[in-house]
Image (spheres, rainbow, N blue to C red):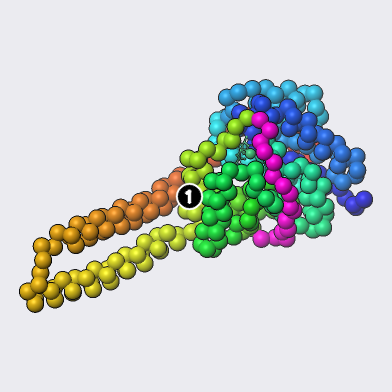
Amino acid sequence: MQDKLTKLTIVVPCYNEEEVLTSTIDQLSGVLKKLIKADLISIGSMLLFVDDGSKDDTWQIISKASTTNSYVTGLKLARNVGHQTALLAGLEIASKHSDCVISIDADLQDDINVIPEFIQKHYEGNDIVFGVRQGRETDTFFKRTTAQGYYRIMNKLGIPLVYNHADYRLMSKRALIELIRYQEEKMFLRGIIPLIGLKTTEVYYDRKERIAGETKYPLKKMLSFALDGITSFTVAPIRLITYLGFLVFFISAVAGSYAIFQKLIGNANEGWTSLMISIWLIGGLQLMGIGIIGEYIGRVFIETKKRPKYAVDVDLYSKKYPFHYLRP
Ligand code: UDP
Ligand code: MG
């Protein structure tokens, strides 16, 4: 047994998850019960379900469960803010009353059987434990290959993503406090958390199929998530455009000299082909350049506003943990 048991909160962002939620609540409560019984975590460990502005009965299920199941508590956001921000809302509030937090998706595609291993690694002194998928057999071929390509590009750009890690991880209170100091509007958690540093390790598991309901990440959202990841971490694409500009300038200089030379020796042709090609090429390059610069200007625009990232509608967590409950 440990000298001092850690108080755990499991944070679960939920958006229209009525189909899976009841079973998720049962399974996660089972895990907590077992861990508490085995003296691995302290009494007062909790499940925190964050309802990210669901349109179905997700919140009704959470609030009802919070009256019948002593482990369950919930946070209802005022509107849908997206997975990453909903998760952050949960982490921020959970960090106030727990020693460590595990985040997991509501569909439990990530194997809950490795939670004891997370806790063990935490006791061994790790502030951050990443859950890493061993295989991607349950993903479609498309998702698998695009994801692999993405990790490769991000690593090339110097963004240290943990390969095959989504948002299944444990963080200590200390790591959470550091995380909350990052005040970016769009928090790309998978990129930011490895930046924190502190002692870190990994736990491996097999990812399962979604048991019910649909993925909340259709292609369009996935693309925008991927782009956010790049633009919030690096200006490499702008640099690339600059290099490309130099290159095109050099090529034009060579081609131009050649054309003038041909003209001088009386070999000039109609010039239609080269004209068309250069107009299209330069036009295309410029558009691309403007687009990429626009991405960053857009980001600066969003970041300078410093708007609050979410609003809380109902907070059952703080009710279960009133202020005086805080440890000295
Ligand atoms: N989610 C959320 N807000 C959203 C979209 C998704 O809180 O706007 C939650 C969702 O309920 C789930 C998690 O984010 O718990 C991951 O979504 P999903 O399982 O659909 O993604 P996938 O596993 O397909 O990548
Ligand atoms: Mg999922």
Using the image, determine if residue 209 lies above or below residue 170.
above
Q: Is residue 54 among what the camera can see?
A: yes
- The answer to whether residue 77 is magenta is no
Magenta span: chief secondary structure: loop
> Left of 244 or right of it: where is 86?
right
Residue 158, image x, y percentages: 54, 63
Q: Nearer the viewer, residue 71 or 303?
A: 71
Of the four image quadrants, the one with ligand 2 is: top right
Number of marks in the image?
A: 1
Using the image, determine if residue 75 lies above or below residue 288.
above
- The answer to whether residue 204 is magenta is yes
Label 1's element? Answer: helix
| Residue drawn at point x = 64 percent, y = 52 percent | 164
> Left of 251 or right of it: where is 213?
right
Q: What stretch of residues is rendered in magenta? A: 197-212
| Residue drawn at point x = 29 percent, y = 54 percent | 284
Dot 1: within a 10 Å radius of its alpha carbon, few (fewer than 14), some, or many (20 or more) residues? few
**Residue wearing tag 1:** 227
| Residue drawn at point x = 72 percent, y = 59 percent | 200
| Residue drawn at point x = 72 percent, y = 56 percent | 202
**Where is residue 161, by image quadrant?**
bottom right
Q: Nearer the viewer, residue 99 or 12?
A: 12
Query: Could you tell me the amino acid type at mark 1?
Result: Leu
Farthest residue, direction left: 266
Using the image, determine if residue 229 lies above or below residue 70.
below
Residue 285, image x, y percentages: 31, 57
**Where is residue 104, by image quadrant?**
top right
Residue 54, image x, y percentages: 59, 28
Q: Is residue 308 among what the camera can see?
A: no
